[in-house]
Image: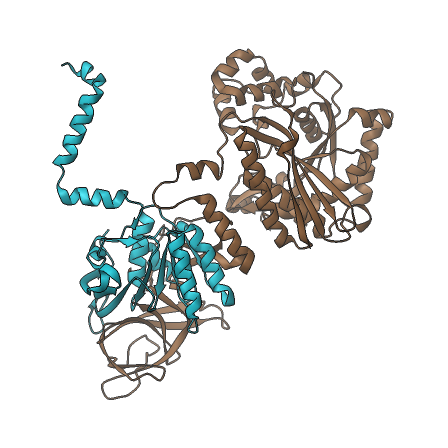
Amino acid sequence: MTAFEHMFDTQGMLRSAASSLEALSPDLLEQLRAAGSKELLPVPQALATLFPEGGVRRGSTVTVSGSSSLVLALLAEVSRHQGWCAEVGSPLLGSAAAAEAGVDLERFVRVAEPGEQWPSAVASLLEAFDIVVIHPPPRAREADMRRLSARARERSAVLLVAGSWEGSQIGLTVIEQRWHGLGSGHGYLQAHELEVQSLGRGAAVRPRRATVWLPQAL
Amino acid sequence: MTAVRALAVWCPDWPVIAAGGSAELPGAVMHANRVVACSAAARLDGVRRGQRRRDAQSKCPELTVYNHDPARDARLFESVATAVEAIVPGIEIIRPGLLVVAARGAARYYQGELPLLATIARAVCDATRYDVQLGIADGIFAATQAAYAAFVVPAGEAAAFLAPLPIRVLDRPELADLLIRLGIHTLGDFAGLPRTDVLARFGPDGAYVHDLARGVEIRPPSARAAPPDLDVEMTLDPPIDRVDTATFVAKTLAEQLHERLAARGLACIRISIEACTENGEQLSRSWRHGTTSPAVSTPGFTANAIADRTRWQLDGWLSGTIRSDDGQPSSGLVFLRLVPDEVIHDDGRQLSLWGAEAGAASGPGGDLEQIDRALARVQGMLGPDAVVTAVVGAGRDVAEQIRLVSWGEPRDVLPADAWPWPGRLPAPSPATVLKSAQPATVTDIGGNPVVVTGRCVVSAAPRWLRIGQQPPVAIAGWAGPWPLDVRWWDRLTARRRARFQIATIDGAGLLMVCENGRWSVEALYD
């Protein structure tokens, strides 16, 4: 068949497309599915092993305690996929660090001083944003947290609590950390080595560990 | 279609006048380091629109520089509009500083065009202290040009009046550039081209501009009265008496209107803003889509442009720049309506601000319209300044580099690393910047406090760190001091600080500052 005739042979083209799809390696296929799926928010490669599904399930609540850079790394991956991130509460994550981590500052909206109305502000943001980071005030009420977590589930957004909260689906904790690059009186902070453990409910009940190097090489 | 006889009222160099300057003193309004407008005196010295600040100041060293504030321009222009409206109803504001009004009926009433001009000039002069220039011609464009020349163009002679004007007055910089390169320098030359050829080469906008140059048509050919169901209105309960609350209403209504128009493939070129107060006063004002405004290149108002016009108008009504006996509401506004007076077919060149983005959005979520609505709600709850995005700019300190911009304001991202900043700490930056520095003590191996000398030398290697009342931790590594000598030329605000990066044995990284022998933690690398 000449190339010209081939062009109209749609059946044949479909067949060849299907066969080339099968030719892909299974784990690449898996990745493609994960990227195409609306159910999971992508996470950086180094953190993927911490999540049983390889990503953060939309509608879930995640806690990250012990490291702000880890929060930024998670946001950066969402930002890279054109997602919108929001942050409520203080102290805010460092903007310069966010930009360096790869967060698109134009799509990273912050509310620094929500005061007493922080639960309503977070609830509004969960309506539209892909991921909302909150720094709950020290005397945050359990009922408020539960309501926000439910709202996140309903709107299939991700609520990321910087700190700790028992109600989350999965929690990341820094167990050990080390800075590299600093001597005594010389050098500068260059690389941060973090030993992170994830623990949660359901599929995440078995603790998982990973060593993460930040800042990530982009 | 024959052009309607129009009268234009123009306040020369309005942004400068509104900012508090005058024609006799050299002054200029700057935006983004460029001259937006300058006074007559400044122009004599060689200051021009679009010049850079430095060039303008070198031409005219005594130049007074004002901030660019379109809202202020619009607010103050309201007093001129009110004065003109007292003589002739149905005015249309093209931009702050320029308004037009249909002249025929009023000219008949005042027994001639010249008496009408005299009446308006006197009324504006009595009511305000501003200079105005007036002009009458066939069509809004010709009338505007006539006002610039302070001239009355006899009926039917608009084309002859426009012919010698340079092509640049059309305010289509790209088109003008091209035409000049083609050897067409005046409106007369352009008008001489066959209309069909212009349409074929430059599209509907080119043909529209060609008509302007010929002085035959004043409005885009497809202008027609809007069907009544396009109005958007809102009852305001509680009544609005503050400008900041009005802003939100203006924005919501403008978006509604724009969406409605976009759904029908229409663009609005003239809009009426109508409001009603608690005491039953009716306020109304029309704004025309300015073909003479430099920022505009689309055939109709965008959602943002409608919101701006509405906000300016409400600002003008509410802020009390107008005298209370003719216009300023005696109480809050209870009702607001936006009426698209004239609409044209949207030829598809208009970049729909929200609609297009939402359609093209991909990836997770990313519905701009939803985002904007959610943020508007938070802004309504906590005030417009509570919702911010950050812009990273130049500077040596972490705090200096960051500028927070309220949501909805322009972000004006500057090229950040155009110049090196000696003394800036290298990446990575601290992920947590503390709101207020935490006091700490740093001691050497013998337990003596570590200090930094005037020559920026550390007295001993830091060994122990104690933050507040917490137990001391051993220091695993440290680097510094990086001195930061801030504002040394000013005795009162000068600060000398030495910065350190410190890593403790439990793995934490800290950015610490020693100032006047006192240590504090500024930020955490966590």
In which quadrant of the rendered image does the N terminus of chain B lie?
top right
The quadrant where residue A2 appears: top left
Q: Colour of chain B?
A: brown
Q: Residue at x 55, y 20 (%)?
A: B185
Chain identifier, colour cyan: A
Instruction: Report which quarter residue B158 is drawn in.
Output: top right
Residue B331 at what x, y percent from top left?
75, 53
Judge left or right: residue B273 versus residue B254. Answer: right
Structure colour scheme: by chain
Quadrant in the picture for the C terminus of chain B: bottom left
Does residue B244 appear in the picture of this structure? yes
Q: How many marks?
A: 0
User: Residue B476 placed where, x, y %?
Assistant: 21, 76
Quick check: A175 above or below B252? below
Question: Taking B480 as reference, is B402 left or right?
Answer: right
Q: Give the farthest residue toward the front.
A: A202
Q: Is residue B256 above or below residue B427?
A: above
Q: Residue at 43% across / 68% down in the picture?
A: A143
Residue B28: x %, y % from top left: 60, 45
Residue at left offset 51%, top offset 56%: B378
